[in-house]
Amino acid sequence: MGFKVAVVGATGNVGREILTTLAERDFPADEVAALASSRSVGREVSFGEDDILTIQNLETFDFHGIDIVLSSPGAKVSAQFAPRAAKAGAVVIDNTSCFRMDPDVPLVVPEVNPKAIADYQKRGIIANPNCSTIQMVVALKPLHDLARIKRVVVATYQSVSGAGRAAMDELFNQTRAIFVNDPVKSEQFTKQIAFNVIPHIDIFMDDGDTKEEWKMAAETRKILDPDIAVSATCVRVPVFIGHGETVNVEFERALSADMARTALRRAPGVSVVDHRADEGYVTPTEAAGEDLVYVSRIRRDPTVPYGLNLWVVADNLRKGAALNAVQIAEMLVAEHLGGKRAPTRSNVEPLRRKAG
Ligand SMILES: NC(=O)c1ccc[n+]([C@@H]2O[C@H](COP(=O)([O-])OP(=O)(O)OC[C@H]3O[C@@H](n4cnc5c(N)ncnc54)[C@H](OP(=O)(O)O)[C@@H]3O)[C@@H](O)[C@H]2O)c1
């Protein structure tokens, strides 16, 4: 018998990627419930190559008997449903910003702080970090272990898929409209995103940072080290999938570019592609659909005593969201829920084969 899993937000960008990732990695689930809003009830979503699931209503779903919930319905919805699911006995792995800074909720990147998963017992909830934070801390962890990071200055180049399905549609529709000379409508972004870049992700805070910039600093400190200073500028770019980041790192001790390259080559979840020549680096389009965090352009920053510059790229829907959540679920199962099996339940669909 496998585990009973619910995916909340299963019609969205992250939810669909979670279903794909569970199937691809052969997650030990024998029942999977796909949940979304009442708007989507009855719609069908794919689960792997061969199976389909019918969307059920999150609002009325009974979580008793569910072992693990992987969720991405937006922060306000998670605030409502996650405590209800945890009370019913499920462990919720939540992709939204809702619980990330809750001191009783672990914020986990398996390559960086896997032991924190054990704290799931406090509230029955584990938080998945922001997509931009995840790829950065995967690259920073092996360097921090070697030479202690003091300060990070990062600029992001974030794809529109990070803002959901409707944002991807907006980039497509604006691009088309510009080519055929139709009026350009901006609803998901504050300004035109096609053929443009927008230095504004999430809301503005009192100090002038955006909340996305604040998240990168606060989450990095919670996951990696509370003493690391992070200054971020987050920018939306007209790319469908894949975030790029320029990361300037200042260390306490000397760390050469060669030593950093060697450490990153050995680090889990990282691929170094750094040839200092045409095509010798990875771009977001090439990282789309891939699981690894790619690090290129590793070079010394001569303006500080011990500094390096990096270019870090990953698929924001996979390592930045779905894959990281499924990796957490895999560790949870292997290390904490090993012996547990839920009683038989009736409100979860058994897997149904696709026709043909
Ligand atoms: N995209 C990324 O790179 C990324 C990375 C990390 C974290 N996240 C976070 O994950 C969340 C979802 O992102 P996304 O890109 O998947 O957005 P999305 O494509 O807009 O999908 C949103 C999902 O949430 C569901 N939903 C909305 N309101 C709901 C409600 N009242 N009850 C139940 N389900 C509801 C939607 O269902 P309907 O189809 O029924 O409306 C849909 O399945 C956000 O909080 C985002 O910040 C995203």
Image (cartoon, grey):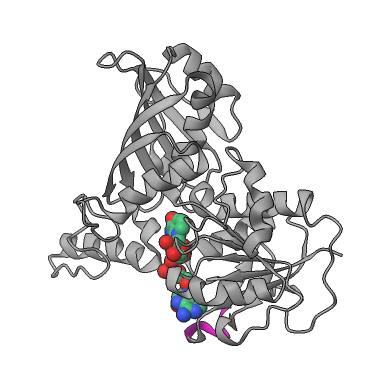
Assess whether residue 310 is covered by the magenta stretch.
Answer: no
- Find residue 299 and report its horizontal and vertical position in percent: 36, 18
Instruction: Decide if residue 125 is on the left or right side of residue 141.
Output: right
Residue displayed at 49% across by 24% down:
143
> Looking at this view, is 16 or 8 the one in front?
8
Q: Is residue 287 visible?
A: no
Residue displayed at 61% across by 32% down:
268
Which quadrant of the view contains residue 171? bottom left
- Find residue 38 and report its horizontal and vertical position in percent: 51, 86
- Find residue 226 and report its horizontal and vertical position in percent: 45, 38
User: Is 209 above or below relative to 304?
Assistant: below
The C terminus - image quarter: bottom right
User: Is 148 above or below relative to 351?
Assistant: above
Residue stretch rendered in magenta on the structure: 39-44
Instruction: Decide if residue 246 is on the left or right side of residue 12.
Output: left
The N terminus - image quarter: bottom right
Residue displayed at 49% across by 56% down:
100
User: Is 20 above or below relative to 294?
Assistant: below
Task: State how many labels appear.
Answer: 0
Instruction: Decide if residue 162 is on the left or right side of residue 190.
Output: right
> Looking at this view, is 116 or 201 the one in front?
116
Which quadrant of the view contains residue 123? bottom right
Which quadrant of the view contains residue 145? top right
User: Is 45 above or below relative to 2?
Assistant: below
- Find residue 61 and report its horizontal and vertical position in percent: 63, 83
Q: Is residue 256 visible?
A: yes
